[in-house]
Image (cartoon, helix red, strand yellow):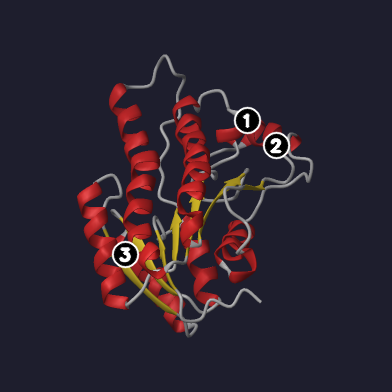
Amino acid sequence: MFDLCGKVAIVTGGSRGLGRAAAEALASQGAHVVITYVKGAEEAARVVEGITARGGKAEAVGFDVADMKATEEAIAAAAKRLGRLDILVANAGIAADNLVLRVKEEEIDRVFSVNVKGAIACARAATKVMMRAKTGRVVFLSSVVGEMGNAGQAIYAASKAALLGLTKALAREYASRNITVNALAPGFIETDMTTVITGEMKEGLLRSIPLGRTGRAEEVAAAVVFLCSDEASYVTGQTIRVNGGMYV
């Protein structure tokens, strides 16, 4: 079950956090994983080393998903070099947490350039390859705040909500080519982005989670593996919530 042997996967922002967990999980099931990064070359290299040390296949490629031309070229080159592209996990994302009255215009532009435009750029490049093969899996990493909102995260929440609409539209566009498109909406997961939340704020968040605990990156990665597998071939246009009941 969930056998990905012979498959090629691209995981954007795969050098740390949820991207790293997803890359490692896909590789553990047999996929050859291409990890993308912008600044974390050393971190990406360590992820690749860890995967190969466990007998998996991985490599790292550096480019900014907000640069559509660079994204197109890098994904096309990886697919050509490896002979195929079966899976895209569009995970790369940034936040600019602030009240909407205080957020700067350049911060808004950058968040949407990476989180939304970057996801579109990756999907467009990857599906060009997938359409020729008449098969493929696309998974967008959204967020619980994209569904429920959160004070101080209006820009981030808006960008993550946009991915949910993108998921539904692309699922309809590519269904005839046997390409599924789904989204994951993680809740409060222990990553580098959430370790800064401490004290009363963290306690308040935990009280809002019915399961009473934070999630683990590996739990999100398990959902990624399922959506990328043959077992999920009849699942498309959906948002899978991995949030401990924080939003239902």
**Residue 210 occupies which quadrant of the picture?**
top right
> Tag 2, which secondary structure?
loop
Q: Which mark is residue 42?
A: 3
In the image, farthest residue toward the top: 101
Q: Residue at x 50, y 37 (%)?
A: 165
Q: Residue visible at 64% across and 69% down? A: 231
Residue furthest to the bottom in view is: 55
Asked whether 207 or 66 is in front, the reply is 66
Secondary structure of the residue carrying tag 1 is helix
Q: CA distance from mark 2 to mark 3?
A: 36 Å
Mark 1 touches mark 2? (CB < 8 Å) = yes
Give 176 or 89, whichever is nearer the viewer: 176
Tag 2: amino acid: Tyr
Give the total number of marks visible in the rendering: 3
In the rendered view of the protein, which quadrant contains the C terminus?
A: top right
**Residue 216 % position (x, y):** 63, 56
Q: Residues within 10 Å of mark 3 (few under 14, many from 20)?
A: few
- Dot 1 or dot 2: first in sequence order is 1
Disc 1 crowd rating (10 Å Cα; few below 14, some 14-19, many 20+) is: few
Q: Say which quarter of the image contains residue 107.
A: top left
What residue is pinned by disc 1? 148
Q: Is residue 192 visible?
A: no
Q: Tell me the quarter of the image containing the N terminus.
A: bottom right
Identify residue type, mark 1.
Met
Front residue of 123/192: it is 123
Instruction: Tell me the amino acid under the disc marked 3.
Output: Glu
Residue position marked by numbered label 2 in the rendering: 247
